[in-house]
Image (spheres, rainbow, N blue to C red):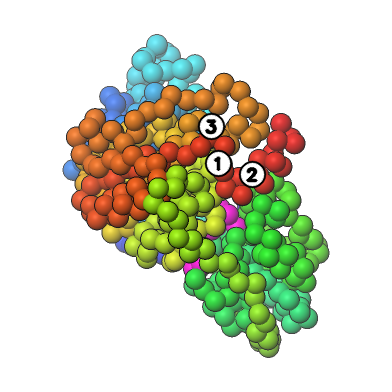
Amino acid sequence: MAKSAGQKSKALKPASGRSEASSHTIGSYLIQRLQDYGVRDVFGIPGDFVLTFYDQLQKSPLRVIGATREDNAGYAADGYARVNGIGAVCVTYCVGGLSLCNSIAGAYAEKSPVVVISGGPGVEERRNDPLLHHKVRDFNTQREVFEKITVASALLDDPLTAFREIDRCLEACVRYKRPVYLELPRDRVDSKPLSPYVPTTSPQISDKDALAAALTEAAERLAAAKKPVLIAGIEVHRFGLQKLVVELAEKFNIPMCATLLGKSVVSEKHPLYLGVYEGAMGRQAVTEYVESSDCVILLGAFMTDINLGIFTAHLDAGRCISATSEKLRIGHHHFHDVVFADFLRGLGGLKIPAKKKTPLPRRESAPATKRPASEPVTIASLFEHINSFLDDNMVVVADVGDSLFAASDLMIHKQTEFLSPAYYTSMGFAIPASVGVQVANRNLRPIVLVGDGAFQMTCLELSTSVRHKFNPLVIVLNNKGYTTERFLLEGPFNDILNWNYHNLPDLLGAGWGFEVHTVGELHQSVQAGLAKTDGFSLLNVHLKPDDTSPALRRLAERMSKQV
Ligand SMILES: Cc1ncc(C[n+]2csc(CCOP(=O)(O)OP(=O)(O)O)c2C)c(N)n1
Ligand SMILES: [Mg+2]
């Protein structure tokens, strides 16, 4: 991580500001600081190396949310962080921690601030390097692995430094919106500080001259631009800047797009909203509009291959103003130490005339095709129907595969109501992430779109939804295997067992399952599923293995050239 100016994180400002540490132990201080930063729930599975801390957690105001597997606990904490602003997961040493790696790697890649807490063998137990259970190579193995997939990490083995280390890591977590790792040896949970420690915070401040120079150049470009366009990316959501972006667009009449990872950071119903920009993979009208713009303002957007439609996007850096929390670039000029939010606020305050309203390429609304009830369900009719029932209290959680690509054309009503691992693309995200969503906000109803392959990976996390009486509507796109992969290279490795997905409620002792072959069955079961508000509903939607969305076909064509 480049050392650059950071972020005064308003929403996440520690509530108590200064938690005097002298009265605390390492464990209780960590619990206090998590709450200061807005954590209310901690996901995970206990084990002997973390039991003392679990006991403290259980007695604290924090709610412990058990999961069926640690990687799922990681996805849940990630989903929670995306809704709540920060999340936490607490596991035991190595068997738990190492199982978390993939989900935490995803949270790192997609900028989701998750605090990973792992128990560990006591400092006294580590002397003479005994062969304790769960040890891999040496006692540092797990911490060294996490160093690579977190933005800050610390072993809380010394009461002299542990309190400061907790603050350093938590601050990095909210500043960079990336996971951090804290390892707490079990004999240090109750250790007290050796000398009085009062936390200090160092708010990030922009370099005034750099900010002013950047805004001057941005003003010149924007004033001269005939056809400016905004592209809002995921950081707009992570830093809570959605309102500023919309105000900016409205003040100067600038049309807006989102990246796929940032889909729904601005309301898709806004009159200035054009659609998702993703190069050749996206809708042609949007691609043409953006690529013929003389001033593309990219805000918090990651230039990933999937966001750019496998690099089919044609964005000339010379015509772009690109700002993230890590970099600010205007044309070919780079500006350092400018805080993302300060730049955005500065743009909003520019004294330049608004652009004339020009007609925008309208989004084709989903064709209101009257389909016969007996017609077999297709990806097209499925997503047409999903589009018709989405409302303001729903959050679409899309897994990898056609559930993500077909979903890119859905109309999301509010901000941030679309969650998906659209960059790291790890299958199995959606079900556990939907648990995190409802732990963070019980009133949001997840509409989970998940392929049969991804579903087989993590579906048992619905067990946690049942325990908490959550009510996701789960739509399994049952195309009998790894359809995305079939496009790249067909082979028997893409086939999977066809489960009776709709019978899962029998196993879990709760929920409602529906088997769906036809349009009529789809409409009926969605209606029945949505009406059941006190438990999960699952639709096993049978699709043909070669039925795909246009977006997936375009993506797969590009990708298959590289395999
Ligand atoms: C954890 C993980 N393993 C493997 C892959 C590679 N992969 C990408 S898409 C895909 C198939 C997805 O199948 P399914 O969930 O049924 O969705 P579909 O493509 O059929 O829509 C696979 C195996 C991955 N992205 N993530
Ligand atoms: Mg599939």
* Label 2 Cα neighbours within 10 Å, binned few <14 / some 14-19 / many ≥20: some
The residue segment tinted magenta is: 259-268
Secondary structure, mark 1, is loop
Picture disc at residue 547: 1
**Depth check, front residue: 447 or 59:** 447
- Asked whether the viewer can see residue 357, the reply is yes
Picture disc at residue 553: 2
* Label 1 Cα neighbours within 10 Å, binned few <14 / some 14-19 / many ≥20: some
267 magenta-colored: yes
Picture disc at residue 193: none
Q: Magenta stretch: dominant SS?
A: loop
User: Measured from the top left, where is residue 430 in percent x and y?
Assistant: 42, 43
Left or right: residue 143 versus residue 390 is: right
- Are the residues tagged 2 and 1 within 8 Å (C-beta)? no
240 magenta-colored: no
Real-space Cα separation, disc 2 to disc 1, in angstroms: 10 Å
Real-space Cα separation, disc 3 to disc 1, in angstroms: 12 Å
